[in-house]
Image: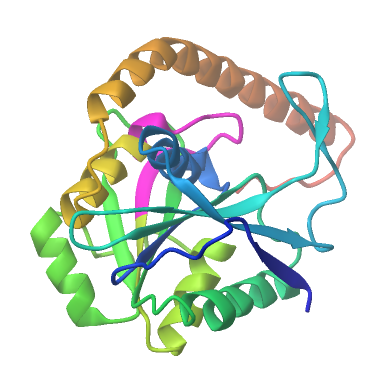
Amino acid sequence: MNWHFKLATKRMPKLRKPVLIEGLPGIGNVGKVAVDFMIDSKNAKKLYDVFSYSFPHSVFVNENNLVELPKVEIYYVKGKSRDILLLSGDVQPAEEKSCYQFCETLVETILKKLNCKEVVTLGGIGLQKIPKEPKVFITGTDPDVIDTFAKKHDVKKELYGIVGPIIGVTGVLLGMAGKKGIKSIALLSETFGHPMFLGVNGARVMLKILDKEYKIGVNLKRLDKEIKELETDMVKKANEFSEVSKKSVKEKLSKKIRDDETNYIG
């Protein structure tokens, strides 16, 4: 087996109608920010460590100047009426085949075993500018589930023509879980599409929706405080990155024209 899910607790907890919420790195990291915030603020308990030789061949240097292998983990939180599984990590599966293998293994060996009946994946929609009030869109595998959720939380379901393929675990897990009869939806929040931008505001909008739907009990005031501390610096950096990118494109285009080469910018 290419993907190994190792139990990280001595005793498996009894979970009540668990729902899995996925938030791995992606556009604006909105899903990762949202899930990591839930893990930290709710003192979630680790349930599984995930390892694979398909992880990127790199390590991270942590705040103690020591190296760490990339990791993916599953945590759980005891909810009021149902329990929440939280899938987070440093990386996505590195290749297309490994992404499918990861999602299939997760569904077949973990979600079925834990009798998980619902999956929510989180992702970002990259825009050219920082959205002041990010909109959240919904898609999934069951039109009735989508309609009910969209009306209840006032999220938009008209995604066709707005986004292209939903890449990575956020998309593939959605399809794999749905294929196995598990209710599956994706919440996609607008965010700035620059790879260095951290979409905290987009994550906050999704957290508000998730908290209302699943009664998680997250402290959004704490996140608001973090947003205020980060927002000014993020906007400044994003604007700087934007200017650098524009300058770089102009320089490259000028060089191409000088060299009598054809160049298309899409």
Quadrant of the rendering where the N terminus is positioned: bottom right
- At x 53%, y 45%, the residue is 27
Residue 11 image point, x, y percent: 52, 62
- At x 83%, y 39%, the residue is 59
> Left or right: 201 with respect to 221?
right
| Towards the viewer: 143 or 38 | 38
> Left or right: 245 with respect to 188?
right
Of all residues, the one furthest to the bottom in this rendering is 180
**Which residues are drawn in magenta?**
188-202
Q: How many marks?
A: 0
Residue 191 image point, x, y percent: 41, 38
Residue 84 image point, x, y percent: 35, 58
Task: Confirm whether the magenta stretch covers residue 20.
Answer: no
- At x 28%, y 82%, the residue is 142
Q: Looking at the rendering, which quadrant does residue 158 occupy?
A: bottom left
In the picture shown, does residue 10 fall above or below 4?
above
> Left or right: 98 with respect to 14?
right
Of all residues, the one furthest to the left in this rendering is 152
In the picture shown, does residue 201 fall above or below 22?
above
Whether residue 166 can be seen here: no
> Left or right: 30 with respect to 95?
left
Whether residue 35 can be seen here: yes
Residue 240 image point, x, y percent: 57, 15
